[in-house]
Image (cartoon, coloured by chain):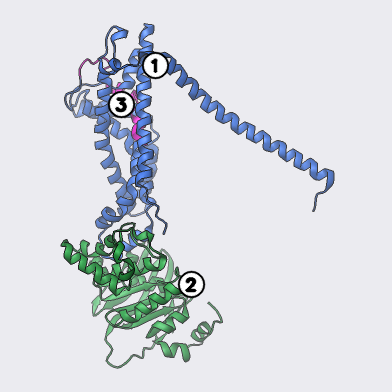
Chain colours: A blue, B green
């Protein structure tokens, strides 16, 4: 069938209309999403920018809003993240290596696989409750930095396992075969051939997971992390606070001036997140080696 | 006819003896009752159309198929009298003796030097002068030394396809195996690179037992001393290359080599 003349023109015109409508709808969705974010950012900037200063970063929280700072929260966030990374990254990578390179592919590994994906979707408060019972009470760690880090590690572990498995799967199989054919053991193959290729992917996936964890307040609040801390953590069992908890605390104060403190703290956190994501992008660029076999 | 009759030269030592080999991927029966004897220090080619099981057969010889989930093998393969599938035998030991080069060049994404020295290093060789010597010797044997001696630190992926494949051969030789298994080593290469590899095989068979899988019949005719023809998982015919290509016993072999199917 061949369309000609007016019929064809009408058909084309209606297609062009549909095309145009779809484009407008897509742009609308983008504008809405970005617009909301931009409004949030502008609001925070408006409230917080004036409060942001060197002394804000280097002061402890205070009853007087104009003297309050986030030093203890900043230090807490920093220490908590380092500990979480040290715990979660090796565990996650190890689990991923086992699942991808060692585990036989049968029903059990599939059950594990599905459950890890489910765990990644469990609300963070639940991890807080688990941490409270397991680390704070049963293991007697108290409301300490290490209890918080262990809880956070549990929270990000599924995401890290998934990211690390994805990264391991991008390693072309011929590389493994070549290694085995040269008489390498499984461990030698993983260590010398698979990990070096998969590492950048593991790293970027994990950094994104950690940068999510850095903004979490609820599991730590459930755990009982304190909101007012006027000293720096001095050890693994020291009490601590983090920026999201400090924000939560300031927002719930009646004085208007504390809202500005909260906004300024949010700005600091946004900067940290930005830096971590930038690091992820940089590392990906730096270490990614294109392998096409 | 699966138990092919073998007419070999007098006094030729046998490297592999394959007896009643059957294998499966899951429930798919790939190799059906294959028996053959592969002579030492000769090039033995295995030809046949795609999917006939020739790659599976060669991959049984160094137990690299063990890595594939669901792969199963029955029957017996001995290498110089040693049962390769003896449960007490470590497959790593098998692979150190029986090296393999794959269809697509698969260099490690590391330097040329690291590629060749990987095998010796796995075996615990740490001394730099020793490693240097092995790298040079292996690259010379693979006729690649003159092309890469100035750029040993360069990433192997920067080499051309043919050079990469010769690097893979050098890497395999560095482990000092007795056997070289080549699974369609030229199928991803252009004619010039192919000619270089074939030339190399002539030299290599002086010191190594070579088993070559190919679906290029001219290649089999040019480089091999013995040829086996496989079809649908069975070994149809096996014998001296000259005889297979000029006077095959089985009508299916004749049909294949004259290009009537495959």
Q: Do we see residue A146 in this rendering? A: yes
Q: Which quadrant holds residue B176?
A: bottom left
Give the structural element (helix, strand or loop) at label 3: helix
**Which residue corresponds to mark 1?**
A49
**Which residue corresponds to mark 3?**
A129
Q: Please name which of the two marks, 2 or 1, marks the residue nearer to the observer.
A: 1
Magenta region, residue range: A208-231
Q: Which sits earlier in the primary sequence, circle 3 or circle 1?
A: 1
* Residue A63 in picture, x, y percent from top left: 28, 7
**Which residue corresponds to mark 2?**
B50
* Residue A178 in picture, x, y percent from top left: 33, 63
Q: Residue furthest front?
A: B150
Is disc 3 in contact with disc 1, using a CB cutoff of under 8 Å?
Answer: no
Give the structural element (helix, strand or loop) at label 2: loop
* Residue B68 in picture, x, y percent from top left: 36, 62
- The residue lying toward the viewer, choosing from A35 and B114, is B114
Location of the C terminus of chain A by quadrant is: bottom left
Q: Chain of mark 3?
A: A
- The residue lying toward the viewer, choosing from B87 and A187, is A187
Q: CA distance from mark 2 to mark 1?
A: 69 Å
Q: Please name which of the two marks, 3 or 1, marks the residue nearer to the observer.
A: 1
Does mark 1 fall on the same chain as mark 3?
yes
């Amino acid at each position: 069938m061949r369309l000609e003349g007016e019929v064809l023109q009408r058909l084309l015109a209606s297609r062009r209309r549909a095309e145009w409508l779809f484009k407008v709808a897509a742009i609308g969705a983008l504008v809405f999403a970005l617009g909301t974010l931009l409004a949030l950012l502008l609001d925070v900037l408006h409230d917080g920018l004036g409060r942001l200063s060197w002394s804000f970063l280097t002061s402890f929280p205070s009853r007087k809003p104009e003297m309050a700072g986030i030093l203890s929260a900043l230090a807490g966030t920093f220490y908590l993240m380092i500990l979480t990374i040290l715990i979660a990254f090796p565990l996650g990578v190890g689990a991923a290596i086992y699942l991808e390179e060692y585990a036989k592919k049968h029903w059990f590994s599939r059950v594990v696989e599905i459950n890890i994906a489910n765990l990644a979707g469990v609300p963070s408060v639940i991890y807080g409750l688990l941490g409270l019972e397991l680390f704070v009470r049963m293991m007697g760690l108290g409301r300490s930095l290490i209890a918080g880090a262990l809880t956070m590690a549990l929270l990000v572990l599924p995401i890290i396992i998934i990211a690390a498995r994805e990264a391991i799967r991008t390693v072309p199989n011929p590389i493994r075969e070549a290694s085995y054919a040269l008489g390498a053991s499984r461990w030698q193959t993983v260590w010398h051939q698979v990990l070096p290729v998969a590492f950048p992917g593991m790293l970027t996936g994990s950094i994104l997971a950690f940068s999510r964890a850095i903004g979490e307040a609820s599991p730590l609040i459930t755990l009982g992390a304190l909101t007012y801390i006027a000293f720096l953590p001095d050890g693994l069992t020291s009490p601590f606070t983090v920026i999201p908890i400090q924000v939560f605390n300031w927002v719930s104060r009646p004085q208007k001036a504390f809202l500005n403190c909260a906004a300024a703290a949010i700005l600091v956190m946004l900067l940290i997140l930005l830096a971590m994501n930038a690091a992820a992008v940089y590392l990906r660029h730096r270490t990614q080696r294109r392998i096409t076999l | 006819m699966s138990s092919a009759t073998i007419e070999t030269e007098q006094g030729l030592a046998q490297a592999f003896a394959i007896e009643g080999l059957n294998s499966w991927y899951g429930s798919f029966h790939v190799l059906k009752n294959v028996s053959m004897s592969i002579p030492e220090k000769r090039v033995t080619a295995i030809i046949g159309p795609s999917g006939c099981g020739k790659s599976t057969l060669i991959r049984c010889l160094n137990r690299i198929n063990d890595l594939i989930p669901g792969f199963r093998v029955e029957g017996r393969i001995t290498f110089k009298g040693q049962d390769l599938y003896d449960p007490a035998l470590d497959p790593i030991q098998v692979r150190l003796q029986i090296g393999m080069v794959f269809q697509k060049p698969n260099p490690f994404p590391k330097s040329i030097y690291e590629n060749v020295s990987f095998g010796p290093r796995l075996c615990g060789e740490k001394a730099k002068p020793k490693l240097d010597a092995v790298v040079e010797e292996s690259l010379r044997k693979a006729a690649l030394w003159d092309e890469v001696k100035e750029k040993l630190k360069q990433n192997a992926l920067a080499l051309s396809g043919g050079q990469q494949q010769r690097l893979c051969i050098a890497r395999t030789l560095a482990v000092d195996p007795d056997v070289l298994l080549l699974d369609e080593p030229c199928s991803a290469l252009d004619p010039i690179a192919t000619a270089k590899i074939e030339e190399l095989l002539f030299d290599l068979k002086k010191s190594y037992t070579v088993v070559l899988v190919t679906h290029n019949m001219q290649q089999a005719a040019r480089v091999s001393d013995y040829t086996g023809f496989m079809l649908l998982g069975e070994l149809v015919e096996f014998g001296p290359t000259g005889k297979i290509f000029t006077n095959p016993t089985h009508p299916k072999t004749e049909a294949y080599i004259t290009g009537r199917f495959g």
